[in-house]
Amino acid sequence: MSKQQIIAGRNPVLELLQSDRGVEKVLLSKSASGDVVKEILQLCRDKEVTYQFVPEVKIQSLSRANHQGVLAITSLITYYNVQEIVDFVFSKGEDPLLLILENVTDVRNLGAVARTALGLGVHAIIFPKKESAAVNDVAVKISAGALLKIPLCRVDNLSVTIKDIKNNGIKVIGLDGTADRFISEAQLKMPLALIAGSEDEGMSNAIVRLVDELVKLPMGSDLESYNVSVATAMALYEVNRQK
């Protein structure tokens, strides 16, 4: 896994944003201006990369390079291709267990989910580039380092990715509190992909239409939903129980 790096200079930062490499944050001097700066800002908005205008002394304290008032801090980790992960797991004679997250935007939830996923045999965590929690130092700390150990796949289009996963013969199930069947009643034999959404928004309709089966967790009537990290842990435990 790669460590964080600081990329200095307008064109290097622009090229970094145009690539598929993960960017955690872009820092710009309050006096930075011009067409390249405008393009950097637009790319940050398009890719939902955090950017911040700071005093130039702050940038100088982070880099002695010719920064031109612009710095980028790269992601803590390297992202993987979903198909490569699936092929690798199958090549080892194992059946893939994948975890797909949609609308999970809280870094603490992401960290907690990753910690459980690593402990319960998940081969990769998959999430969209947009509307997902940042994989930053807070998330890594909450995960107890699991985010640096379990393969992460950041995808452009979650719907397309799920279709590709199904084409590999992997069953896709989704956690939904309105489902007719409890997860304990479902056939969870791997290869399997489990989809979890946030407790606020859940899975989108577009994703729900793609799943092979919706399942729910046991829950008392006084509670509306579980935290996504708790729900994921319960579901993955049941998957492991049925192995």
Image: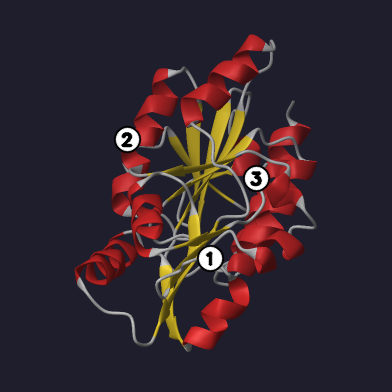
- Label 3 Cα neighbours within 10 Å, binned few <14 / some 14-19 / many ≥20: few
- Between the C-alphas of marks 3 and 2, the distance is 27 Å
Q: Tell me residue 98's x, y (percent).
A: 58, 35
Residue of label 3: 2
Element assignment for label 3 = loop
Q: Amino acid at mark 3?
A: Ser
Q: Tell me residue 204's x, y (percent).
A: 34, 55
Asked if one can make out residue 230 in the rendered structure from this viewpoint, the answer is: no
Element assignment for label 2 = helix
Q: Residue at x 56, y 69 (%)?
A: 106
Q: Residue at x 44, y 27 (%)?
A: 165
- Between the C-alphas of marks 3 and 1, the distance is 21 Å
Which of the two labelled residues, at mark 2 and mark 1, occupies the earlier sequence position?
1
Vertical position of residue 233 compared to residue 167: above or below: below
- Label 2 Cα neighbours within 10 Å, binned few <14 / some 14-19 / many ≥20: few
Residue of label 2: 160
Q: Residue furthest left?
A: 35
User: Quadrant of the image for the N terminus?
Assistant: top right
Q: Amino acid at mark 1?
A: Ala
